[in-house]
Each structure stands twice: as structure tokens, then as C-alpha cells.
Image: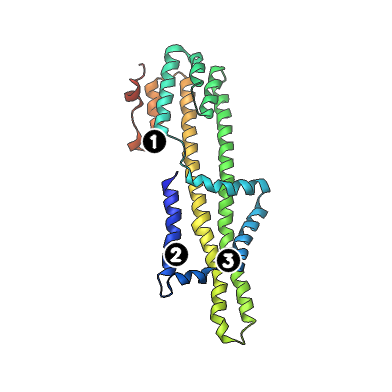
Amino acid sequence: MDLASIVGFIACLVLVIFGIVGGDDGFAAIGFFMSGSSALITFGGALMATMMSVSISDFVAGLKSFTLIFKPVKVNVPEMITKIIELSNVARKEGLLSLEEAAGNLEDDFMKKGIMLIVDGTDPELVRGILETELNSIEDRHKGKIGFWETCASMGPAWGMIGTLVGLIIMLQHMSDPSTLGPAMAVALITTFYGSMLANWVCTPTANKLKTNNAIEVQAKEIMIEGLLSIQAGENPRVIEEKLKSFLAPKDRVSGNDANGGGEA
């Protein structure tokens, strides 16, 4: 589980509740923020407007993608670079055809596909084209889910304002009784509160986390492409290692040669 997402999600709700109950009314104040009609207008309106923006299948996929923010990205770039260096050593000693056996032990389908293209003697430019096309397709799917949450984030406050306007119109219809104005105004403003919570507690953080996860996965696959093409070109494993380590932050640049006994000169 992604600890940052879990802690952040729960802490936001706890802080809001603490702010509500911290006044003179205590926990009774929570009831002031409960309104079925306001929730129906804000949450229902925002979700239905978002549905209008996409297909039904994309809408369902977008909702399901919320769970992805609680799952850590299964990418360990330093280990992946180490694996690529191991493959380059195998290819340098035994030839590119020997990589076919090594590919059977790989868990990553993207890397396995690249290895098999190399083993089949595919032209390097064609290998790059095929892998980059698949990478672009992956990124497009990710952007679709990110766009879903960004759309929902923009709809939340908008429908909250619509709910507030509805409440104000109803309130103004009952101006003859001044004692009802305060409670009616409070109910009208609840929809704005709901819209802000939907956007800033759920939708925007979800979109941002999916962007972060997408960037991590895209970088990992870009490293794979460069590493596999370098193996195909017959580059020295030490050169490949230095090339791939340039993708990493300095603190993450663990020497693959130290782990593997170094590549051949």
C-alpha cells in the first residue's frame, strides 16, 4: 500500500472534522454539514457531468482508477538497470541469440518483448518504433484516467455553486420569515463546501498521484528502450551502465558493475 496516499487521504478528513467539532457545538456541529439534497446536487451533478465528457467504459475505468493511488508503483529503476547490465554481459559473451533463454526469466512484459525483437534480428529503428508506440499507448491510457479526475475536479466546485444558487433562490422565496434566513443560508452554502471537498480532497490529489505514477513508469520504460538498443548495438556494458544511470538522481546511482562484477572491456 502507498503510505503517503493513505495517510494524506485520512489526515485531510480528520483535520476537517477536527475543525468542525472544535467549536462550541462540539460533535453536534457535524450535523450542520449534512444535507441529502446538497449532496445529490453536488456529487451527483459533478459525476453525471463528468460522465457526459467521456464514454461509459471510460467513466467506469476512471472511477476504478481511484484505487491505484493506494498501490505503490512496482518499478525499481536501479534493479532494472542492473538487470539490463546483466543481459548486456550475457549478450557480449555469448551473442544476442543467448538472450532468448534469459528473456524467459523476465517478469516485465515490455522488456521481454524488446528482447525477443532483438533476438529475432529486427532492425534497431524498427525496435525503437515498436517499443515507443507501445509506450505512447500506455501513456495515453494513463492520461485518460488523469483527465477523468481533472474533469471531475473542475465539475465539483461548479456544481457546488449551482447548488448554492438553488438554495439561495429557495431562501429568497421565504424572506417573509427572517428567522429562517440563517439556517437556509447555511444549507445553501453546504453545496459549495461539498464541491470544494470533492475537488481538493479527492479529485485533484488523485489526478496528481496518477501523474506521478505515470512519470515513474514512463521513465522506467524509456530506460528499458535505451538499454535494449544499446545491447543490440553491442555497446560495452560499462558504457551502457553510465548511459542508463544518467536517468537517475545522484543518490540512486548505485553501480551496477559493483553488483555484477563489472562488464567486459
User: Which numbered circle lies on residue 160?
Assistant: 3
- Asked if residue 182 lies left or right of residue 172, the reply is left
Q: Nearer the viewer, residue 244 or 192?
A: 192
Q: Label 1 vs label 3: CA separation?
A: 43 Å
Q: x and y percent of residue 256 in the render?
A: 36, 26
Query: SS at mark 1?
Result: loop
**Which mark is in front, 2 or 3?**
2
Residue closest to the far top: 94
**Which mark is in front, 2 or 1?**
2
Q: What amino acid is labelled 2 in the image? A: Ile
Q: x and y percent of residue 55 in the render?
A: 67, 48
Q: Nearer the viewer, residue 46 or 116?
A: 46
Query: SS at mark 2?
Result: helix
* Residue 1 found in image quarter: top left
**Which mark is in front, 1 or 3?**
3
Q: Label 2 vs label 3: CA separation?
A: 19 Å
Residue pointed to by mark 2: 17
Q: How many marks?
A: 3
Q: x and y percent of residue 86 in the render?
A: 41, 21
- Mark 3 Cα within 10 Å, few/some/many (few <14, many 20+)? many
- Asked if residue 34 lies left or right of residue 11, the reply is right
Q: Where, quadrant-wise, is the C terminus in this rendering?
A: top left
User: Which numbered circle lies on residue 248?
Assistant: 1
User: Which numbered circle lies on residue 127?
Assistant: none
Query: SS at mark 3?
Result: helix
Q: x and y percent of residue 32 in the render?
A: 51, 72
Q: Which sits earlier in the primary sequence, circle 2 or circle 1?
A: 2
**Where 189 falls versus 3 (above or below)?**
below
